[in-house]
Image (cartoon, rainbow, N blue to C red):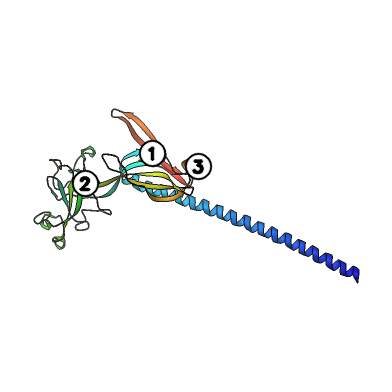
Amino acid sequence: MRLKHGHTLVEALCALTLGGLLAVSSALTLGATRSALERAEARDIGGRAEREAVAVVRRALATGAAVLARGDTAVELDLLLGAGVACAVGARELLLPWPAAAGLTTLPTMPTADDLVAVRNRPVAAEDWHYAVVDSSGPRVVSGSCRAADGWRSPLAEAQPLLRVVLVDSVPVDIEPGAEVRFYRRGRFALYHAGRGEWMLGWRRCHPWSGACGPIQPVAGPLRSAGAGGFRVSAAHALTNNGWELRAMGVGGRGAGALVWP
């Protein structure tokens, strides 16, 4: 009986030891699996963030103007806000049909002070744009201007206000009703350190003439640092009669394919 009892005790001890080893092994396996899943999730989140950052810059470059590379982690450009047709021109103001009044004005973002307006008569060459800084803009009821009878807006929209854009300087004397108008906002997309070891793609609004920029606002992230293969900017320039001009730009990251501008 003692021998049988002894074997039972040894078996019990072996079983407990084996159970403990299995428990430790299971815990280690679960921990390793969880760590692997967390790393995979982090890589997936980082890849999505980088693709999102590149997509944001891609959309901006597609319609932007005056593009500049600021080092290898920033892009400066005039961001397109909207466009329209001037139905009346004053000494320092442009009048446009209110957005959706006749389909002649598209403004997802309303221009504000220090935005840039580009205006040219049609038909013209591309280099005939005139640029000016916006002083203010907003709705304005102006009787006798931009009438429905002249095709500027529908009869139902006759009582609606017009979009009045006041400029800092005078409107060029050769600009006439029917001129094409575009609104831009100068700014920079840049990679910046947001703290806690995170890097983000941010946007800073800048003055079109002085170049002074405001505080940065996050757009996409978190991203890898530029040194770790994250968001990077590369530019190709060519020497022309006007000096060095930007001819192509690549923007990309390890988690997203590079894009080329233009």
Residue lying at the far bottom of the rendered structure: 1
Seen from the viewer's position, the closer of residues 226 and 253 is 226
Secondary structure state at the residue bearing disc 1? strand
What is the x, y in percent for residue 106?
A: 24, 53
Tell me: 9 left or right of 148: right
Residue corresponding to mark 3:
228
Residue neighbourhood size for the residue with mark 2, other residues' Cα within 10 Å, grouped as few (<14), some (14–19), many (≥20): many
Mark 2–mark 3 Cα distance, whole angstroms, equals 41 Å
Numbered circle sitting on residue 134: 2
Tell me: 128 left or right of 186: left
Which residue is drawn at the image coordinates 38% and 49% (left, top)? 56
What is the x, y in percent for residue 83?
A: 24, 49
Mark 1–mark 2 Cα distance, whole angstroms, equals 29 Å
Tell me: 97 left or right of 32: left
Kind of residue at disc 3: Ala
Kind of residue at disc 1: Met
Residue corresponding to mark 1:
249
